[in-house]
Amino acid sequence: MKILGITAEYNPFHNGHRYHLEKSRELTGADYVIAVMSGNFTQRGEAAIMDKWERSRLAVENGIDIVFELPFVFACCRAEKFAAGAVDILAGLGATHISFGSESGSLDRLGTLVTRLRQRHREIDCKRQLLMKQGSSYARSFQAAAGEVLGEEAASLMLSPNNILAIEYMNRITEKEYAIEPVTVERYGSGYFDRNQGAGIAGATAVRELAESGNPDEASEYVPDNVFRAISEAAVSRSECEERAFQLIRAEIIKNSTSSLSTIYCMGEGLENKLKKEIIRAGSLQELVSSVVSRRYTEAAVRRLMVYILMGIRERDPQKLLYGRVLAAGAKGRELIRAMKRQGISRIPVITNINKETDICEGVYDTLRYDLLASDMYNLICGKDIYSFSDKVKRPYIE
């Protein structure tokens, strides 16, 4: 049995995602395709354009057999942890293949770079730490250190976002010695921010901007029909969402002392003092984020920190337990869920109903609770009814 795993945000599902799915099926001959998808907050620390239930339903309607949630503690994190969590979950669910998009499109080039990074990791890590002490961010320091050690041609592969994740996926597979075969599909047409009208392909950022523009009908060229209808009916207004989030975050920063703020997850190096100073002048979340961004902290890192403040996460290292929580499934997906539970295909807990499968949920609650909290906070800042859209009330979409 071939089970193809895909990691995604589907924020929203667009024609590029459909191309990737179809090409991946063709390359692997997969019997089933499962996706591990970010929940209501993305890797860049932003609220998703639609909630996880809607995005997972649309993914199933467009060909994914099952969508599992990538737990918040992995999903809203830097690339290394995002990829590690996704690969660990796919391996635990019995995936035989993993497919990811890349700007390179060459598995050999990416694989060679991963091997060289692992061979020279101590030297690269020492240089990375030195560059970080000089004020550069983790990502920039790592890329620069790899360039110094391995040469600029190899390091140039690490400048593109999909390549970066591809490298992290392959590194995790190698590190854990997983029996998963990687497959890459060259990113078609455009990057996150671009659009190629002739090909009907646009990046997720471009699609979201079109959806929130004065003429959202333009987005219809780049997404399947059912996604366009859903965007038109249910898309979250980024400006309204960010305004509500800003008011809550501002209140937390104002009412907490600097020592209390310093205990927030990923807060460090005096950032609490910077936030206390800038919150007085900031008139919006973007202004606050921009005032904190520096060589040391990228916008994505600062936005993730804002989400941690919003959620009040104070653990220095939240437990990262593994489980597969079903968000949506098609007919073939239902077959696979039964096989996962009854035939031992899955080596991690598979959760379909958090209210009934209490024993399973208790075993992973230290991680699962952040998924539940993230949904509540998302519903609050998006103006949704907290009870009706609660994770304890919503059920997976079953086709």
Image (tube, helix red, strand yellow):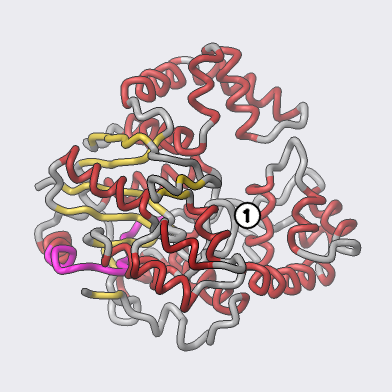
Residue 370 visible from this viewpoint: no
Q: Is residue 352 found inside the magenta-colored segment of the image?
A: no
Left or right: residue 255 versus residue 327 is: right
| Number of numbered markers | 1
Is 103 situated above or below 342? above
Instruction: Give whichever of 217, 250 is nearer the camera.
Output: 217
Left or right: residue 358 versus residue 94 is: right
Q: Quadrant of the C terminus?
A: bottom left
Residue at the location (47% across, 67% down)? 371
Q: Amino acid at mark 1?
A: Arg
Instruction: Give whichever of 212, 46 is nearer the camera.
Output: 212
Residue 326 visible from this viewpoint: yes
Residue found at the very far front of the displayed protein: 198
Residue at the location (80% across, 54% down)? 272
Residue 102, image x, y percentages:
40, 35
- Based on the displayed image, in which of its 4 quarters is residue 185 positioned? top left
What span is in magenta? 321-335
How packed mark 1 is, by other alpha carbons closer than 10 Å (few <14, some 14-19, many 20 or more), is: many
Residue at the location (58% across, 25% down)? 143
Residue 4, image x, y percentages:
22, 47
Report the residue marked by disc 1.
Answer: 304
